[in-house]
Image (tube, grey):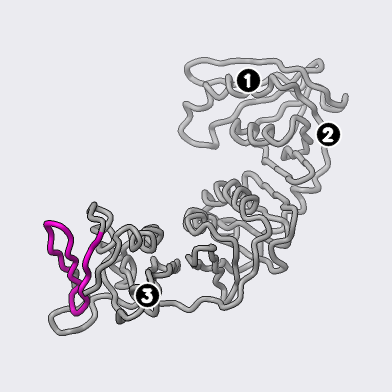
Amino acid sequence: MLELDRKELLASLSPLQTLLKKQSDQDSGSGCLTYDSDRFYCRAMDFHLTSLAPKCFKDVESFSVSGDFVSFLQRTTADTIQLEFGDVIKVKVKRSNTKFATKDDKGDLLFSRTVFEFPKKWTDIPDPSAFFTSFEKLGKMSAKTMSGRYPALSAVHVHRNKMEASDIKQYLSMELDEPVTEEDLLIPATAFGFIKSINPDKYQVEDNQIFFKSDTGLIGSCPLLGGDFPDMGNMLTAKGHTVKVSKFIHEAVARCAVFTSRFRFDEEKTFTIKFVSDHVVISAISAYGSTEVPVKARYPEEMEGRVIRVNPDLFEECLSHSLEILVAESSIRVQTDTSCYVAVLKSEVKHHE
């Protein structure tokens, strides 16, 4: 019989809930908890997570049990609990005697063991906060991508101090102060929440898996994507003309979005920008109304009379980086010391008739 502090045990188990909640009928190890050699383990598909167990577990033999074991402990308020291990795990708390099976009637394990190997040596993430701030912003873009031609577009590409992502309609790169890795890494965008829950300050790459480790001993891994990130050279070097707009542009875009937001598909959510008499005139129209908002701007003479069509969300993202925009034939681009953002136009730049 093992008697221990419930809060101490939950401090080890609660971080694993990220994966324990993701049970799968196709994988008997998915959504289950394994204890082995001073550590708790769990997995969900190709994602793995492990935490250090309380020291009082040092003499406990290896076991695997349903993730419901953790959920049950979270729903009791007792300060201490008693655990008895065998073919079932008996949990004794005030006013309750509960059992969780580890084996079936034939004595076979109910759940597959979820133990996994992890690296012995680790590499520091130079600035974890900056890394995950960039990852979150980039990940939101690539997580929406479903591209059979370029699977890498569903990932965040990391190389040295540069991180980049694209969803075909837009591209964003961000630079960190210090290099993260000399390797080319394609980290699945959908892994962001999982990785963030680890709160790591170290990482390592082994066998097409990337591992993350926190200073609390929490270790997780997820698969890296194969292939190469598409060459964005044409988008990044396209020639065009520089346009500088006033801060009022934000309000003008917000007004137009009232009309474009009613459309169901993103392809329909566009407004036009006309370059007329030292102004950009933004206009939007729907079945319920229309608006036209002039905004002061500076641009070369060659831009006079031209019209472009763009998605308001992409244009607002562009403006969030800079009010100085390069308008190319089929894209708009902003460049700062630490970032580059490109959005694809809905139609080619042309003269307004």
Residues at marks 1 and 3 touching, judged by CB atoms closer than 8 Å:
no
Name the residue at 59% across, 56% down: 153
Amino acid type at image mark 1: Glu
Q: Where is residue 46 in the image (x, y as percent from the top left)?
A: 44, 69
Q: Nearer the viewer, mark 2 or mark 3?
A: 3
197 on left or right of 353: left
Q: Give the range drawn in magenta.
A: 80-99
Q: Does the magenta stretch include residue 91?
A: yes
Badge 2 amino acid: His
Horizontally, is 229 left or right of 297 in the view?
Answer: left
Who is closer to the viewer here, 66 or 136?
66
Give the residue pinned by disc 1.
Answer: 251
Please state which amino acid type lies under the numbered disc 3: Thr
Q: SS of the residue at dot 1?
A: helix
Q: Is residue 218 above or below residue 309?
A: below
Classify 247 as above or below 101: above
Sort mark 3 into few (<14), some (14-19) or many (20+) by Cα contacts within 10 Å.
many
Residue at image coords 73%, 51%: 175
Compare marks 2 and 1 and give the one earlier in the sequence. 2
Residue 241: which numbered mark, if any?
2
Q: Distance between the residues labelled 2 and 3?
A: 57 Å
Instruction: Give how far across and how far down residue 66 sits, in percent.
Output: 26, 67
User: Residue 115's x, y, as percent?
Assistant: 40, 77
The label on residue 114 is 3
Label 2, label 1: how many angstroms apart (C-alpha)?
A: 23 Å
Q: In this view, does 169 lie to the left or right of 245?
A: left
Assess whether residue 224 is covered by the magenta stretch: no
Q: Which of marks 2 and 1 is in front?
A: 1
Per the model, the C-alpha gap separating discs 1 and 3 is 53 Å
Figure quadrant of the N terminus: bottom left
